[in-house]
Image: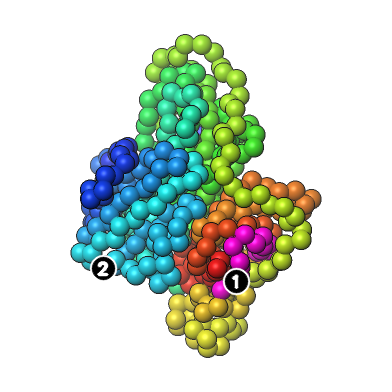
Amino acid sequence: MPMSRRRFLAGSAATAAVAAAPLRAGQAPDLLTAAPADQQVAPEGYARTAVWAYDGTVPGPVLRVPQGGRVRRRLLNALPVETAVHWHGVRIDNAMDGVPGLTQAPVPPGGSFDYDFAVRDAGTFWYHSHQRSMEQVERGLHGVLVVEEPEPPELDHDLPLVIDDWRLDPETAQLIAGFDKMHDLSHAGRLGNLISVNGRFDPAQTVRRHDRLRLRLINAATARIFPVGLDGMEGWLIALDGMPLAQPVAVTGAFTLAPAQRADLIVDVTAEAGGTASLVTVERDGAYGIARFPVAGQAAGIRREAPNPLPPNPLPRIADPAAAPLHAMTMTGGAMAWLSEARLNGETLDGRALAQRGKFWALNGVADRDTAPFIDAHPGETHRIAFVNDTMFPHAMHLHGHHFREITDSGALGPWRDTILVERGRTRQVVMVADNPGDWLLHCHMLGHARAGMASWIRVA
Ligand code: C2O
Ligand code: CU
């Protein structure tokens, strides 16, 4: 595969591991401070980029907790605007879900909020702002949450790799202002001109030939879908969206990582000593390296056996998916299929009036979170959702507080996920067990789309 480095149009994102010591009564929780910062996102020689960051870096600190442990963080808001933290993919207590206007009040500048919740599932999760998330996630307010298996697989390196893209001014390396541009909101979202991994352009991590790595890939971009692949490494997909696959799947070509999705890989470095292995993204004109793994020396031994599957998480049993009530969620709107009308705050508005209010999309004819839930479920019930994409764009649909499984065309159940990519013109059906009480958002994780109408919610009570 001919491969080059991706150009900028072409940080010091040190991801510090933070031990989660159990708190004693009366002890103040560790802080997570959201504040303006600056970081070398663009290549050396360009200016540092002004960002909004957790604890001073984009991505924020890698929080590591053991499965069954608790995450305890006091969010301190040192931003000039309101904020809140959502813990994406965690089957969390509803009150800790971090959605302003649904599960908590936004945290004002100078304010704080104590997040404190148990983590039942081991895996790769992430956290990000859920207040004006289109802008705040884009500016850098996201980080990694690793919940560790009691007996993790044997590895030489465990590497969270947060993939993001930035729309930077090529002269100044500053974020181009305008997070609500009508063109972005009504098309594919705010696509960038610089791809970063762990907050910097084309970072390097030295490895040895035959090293075994766990790559925890996270797509933190607000809009871009990444086809990702490997060069000079071979391995297996072992988990998606935090949840272990029943069997590792050998990585052969590129696979797709939609916004908010995660993929855990176990890979062995096969590039020669002195060479370079790479994480690549595949674009129209070829594969581009986005993170480098210079190979210095050789580990003892030769290529190892396929890894064992990770131990399963305590997910619900889906008894009879075909018998579960089916709820269609039809997505409409966007460029080339403009809304003629939709409901907004109980009023029916025409397309022009919706556009004036920054709304370009609807879910079942409603251009925002409705007053009534899309599904009103009793705890323990099984429900199916058919995501019907009647638009000209793909959408990455994400449900809070639960994972679901796709029911494929053949009727088989796919892997557990919290975000599913629904290509334009496609219908994808999922099944979920509503086992987590509370009000849960269901929205497109192309965050401009969510902002412009693609947001709904379910109730489990
Ligand atoms: Cu990643 Cu509604 O969230
Ligand atoms: Cu969308």
* Point 66% across, 49% down: residue: 317
Instruction: Give the residue number, with chain letter if any, for mark 1.
Output: 376
Give the mark count: 2
The label shown at residue 428 is: none
User: Is residue 184 something one can see in this rendering?
Assistant: no
Which residue matches tag 2?
108
Residue 46, percent from left and from top: 26, 46
Q: Is residue 345 shown above or below 196?
A: below
Question: What kind of element bears circle 2?
Answer: loop
Residue 100 image-quadrant placement: bottom left
Counting from the top left corner in percent of width and height, residue 8 is at 38, 46
Kind of residue at disc 2: Pro
Which of the two marks, 2 or 1, is nearer to us in this view? 1
Q: Which amino acid does label 1 sit on?
A: Asp
In the displayed structure, would residue 48 be above or below residue 274? below
Q: Quadrant of residue 426?
A: bottom right
Per the picture, the main secondary structure of the magenta-coloured stretch is strand
Residue at the right extreme, as displayed: 410
Would residue 188 be found to the left or right of residue 179 on screen? right
Q: Is residue 30 magenta?
A: no
Q: Residue placed at 61% from the left, 24% from the top?
A: 306
Residue 350 pos. (x, y %): 55, 87
Tell me, yes or no, whether the highlighted magenta stretch contains residue 375.
yes
The secondary element bearing badge 1 is classed as strand
Residue 223 visible in the picture: yes
Specify few, some or many for label 2: CA neighbours under 10 Å numbering under 14, 14-19, or 20 or more.
some
